[in-house]
Amino acid sequence: MTDILQQDIQYLPGVGPSRKKMLNEELGISCYGDLLQYYPYKHVDRSRLYSISELTGDMPFVQVKGHILSFETFKMSARKERVVAHFTDGSGKVMDLTWFNGGKYAKQNYTIGKEYIVFGRPNVYNGRINVTHPDMDAAEKLDCVPHSDQPVRELSTMGMQPYYNTSEKMKKSGLNSRSVERLTKTLLDVLKTPLPETLPPFITEKLHLMSRDDALRKIHYPQNARELEQARVRLKFEELFYVQLNILRYASDQRRKYRGYVFSKVGDYFNGFYRDNLPFELTNAQKRVIREIRKDMGSGRQMNRLLQGDVGSGKTLVALMSMLIALDNGYQACIMAPTEILAEQHLQTIMDFLRGMDIRVALLTGIVKGKKRQEILDGLLDGTVQILIGTHAVIEDTVQFARLGMVVVDEQHRFGVAQRAKLWNKSTNPPHVLVMTATPIPRTLAMTLYGDLDVSVIDELPPGRKPIVTQHVFDRSLPSLYDSIRNQIHQGRQVYIVFPLIEESEKIDLKNLEDGFQVLTQVFPEFRLSKVHGKMKPADKEAEMQKFVSGETQILVATTVIEVGVNVPNASVMVILEAQRFGLSQLHQLRGRVGRGADQSYCILVTGFQLATETRKRIDIMCETNDGFRIAEADLKLRGPGDLEGTQQSGMAFDLKIADIARDGQLVQMARDEASAIIEDDPTCTSERYAVLWRRLKELRKTNINWGAIS
Ligand code: ADP
Ligand code: MG
């Protein structure tokens, strides 16, 4: 289909080769459609004129019509001057327009006595209303309809003026928001015939959505706030809807293509473990989730399940028991961890749990080499290795299984749809997949990022855990913090002290850690300290960590390498230095390292005295709640989904232009509902009734690299 929206942007009147280049490089705009979808970041109501007597110092942007009485120039320094224009609306009242920069230009270009519409944010200076760096338009220019031969119209029908983001470079070459505005106006004139509708009438009618043509025009030039809102809703819904349709189509495709292994038997491994090895009663949440998993695995459908549960909620045990079901049915199982330390810890935990049972468990990571590695690979191929524990390397490698029936992926962050798809190619039938995440993902994000997965939630912690007490202290009160640490250690507890490590400045951070470690050894001469960081050799790291685990050292000084993994129930204090440098979910993960034993645990967030508002909010939320879901919601709101770790490689569309997963939760749900009803009704995507949709989806998949990645 040759579409006018594909038309090269240089054919648009007002765009020459140099502007084309600029638009291309700075905004990624290369065709009409790109410009059409370059939505304004805000609008300003141009429909109302104010008189000077109405203005106060706390108003948003306003506009006043009037003329300049005189200019005045004030020397500020040898080279700088301030230019003030005295401006009246004819009522006898006067306000000031001030330029700290570009005053000379103003004096040359604005004519005394001529009618202007002045636009800006008023403030009060020296008892007078003042607007600094106002936008000025000749009144007669604004009063007429641009690009048309219609007669002058009333300003009050002008509606809302769009504002577009432009880069510094663009502004320097004169391509500012106003210029982009002229371009979008021209574009909408050029697009005379209505743009084709991309949603079927049964949806637009049911949800009272504006037509696509209307929406794409009104998103730039609405008459009023209500119209703008309607246009936004329509465009957001459409974006979210196609994302959902894409995910659900994919999931339903996979379901039709692949049958799952039927694990109908619950046998000696599972039952024996339950009877003889389970060291404690399962929580109700664990029981429920295990039931859900058993049902999936017995259904003949391949399981694709996301297991969400806060840190310490006992996901490992659920994973292990699910793997035992695979074993009971004569299959192998595999668990993948994001780091070697965590893989090793899983090995430890699982070996402990399985003590006395005749099950062959093996660990395969990058450091397992030579003969040992070959033995394991052989064991996997002949089926004698029943449970494999490893890092993600096991899916990339040439690792072959005899009968892989179940895969557990721990910590989903770096493991999106595309990676999961690889598993499915490992055997004729894809194994059942359980993805575990300790960072609870807000529902709306889960629907988008892991939209093809069913979700189980462990929403209950094992009994007897005392909520962790979180406190914020300023770094000037470190001495008294050291005293309480000393106190805790004297009571037999252990302590983590975490230094931030951010990749870009790794060298500095490491030096920070080394220096900090020196200081701490002097502060605590009576205790023994361990130190670990990501740059250490795995063996050294392991050895240091082991000293802390065994209780030989009382304080573990670390970077965020301990974020995932480590389980030391006796550690009751987590001190996070320069806490302002950590994101919310990272703070929450770190906090989850304590509170694993029976003792009251503490998390101390240390920061400098000056805090940015956002930081303040993060710290406050941490002190307020231990609830991982609340923290994840807040995190999503504060940062937006684009910044969330892993979303870029997720293989799902996150280049949303207008919708916001965090703030448009309701629309995500609506889009999901509509999309899933359609997939259910037309699983093969062939019905004439939905032809518009399938055609549009195909188009989108062609132009969107992310979307293509999961086909
Ligand atoms: P997660 O991986 O969800 O963060 P873990 O699986 O590491 O949590 O479990 C945290 C701790 O709780 C482990 O020491 C585990 O043995 C213990 N645990 C798990 N389930 C229970 C339970 N039902 N009762 C008591 N302790 C439990
Ligand atoms: Mg875990």
Image (tube, grey):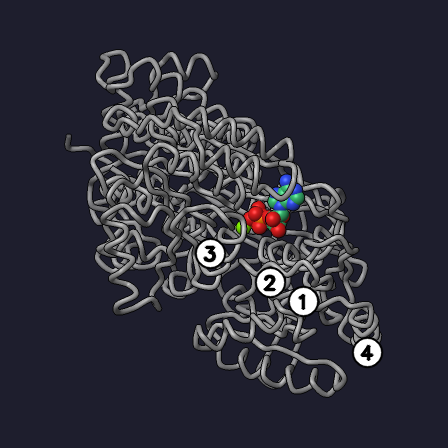
Does 432 sit left or right of 122 as displayed?
Answer: left
The Cα–Cα distance between marks 2 and 4, rounded to whole angstroms, is 23 Å
Residue 643 visible from this viewpoint: yes
On the image, the x and y values in percent for residue 77 come to 64, 83
Question: Quick one: label 1 or label 2, which is nearer the N terminus?
Answer: 1
- The circle drawn on residue 479 is 4
Neighbours of disc 3 within 10 Å: few (<14), some (14-19), many (20+) = many
Disc 3 target residue: 347
Disc 1 target residue: 576
- Which residue type does callout 2 highlight? Phe
Disc 2 target residue: 582
- Which residue type does callout 1 highlight? Ile
Residue 63 visible from this viewpoint: no
* Residue at the image position 52 percent from the left and 75 percent from the top: 543
State yes or no: Cβ of the residue under disc 2 lies below 8 Å from any atom of ligand 1: no
Secondary structure under the numbered disc 3 in the rendered image: helix
Q: Nearer the viewer, residue 598 or 608?
A: 598
Question: Quick one: label 2 or label 4, which is nearer the N terminus?
Answer: 4
Q: Nearer the viewer, mark 2 or mark 4?
A: 4
The Cα–Cα distance between marks 4 and 1, rounded to whole angstroms, is 15 Å
Question: Quick one: label 1 or label 3, which is nearer the N terminus?
Answer: 3
On the image, the x and y values in percent for residue 258 come to 25, 28
The Cα–Cα distance between marks 1 and 2, rounded to whole angstroms, is 9 Å
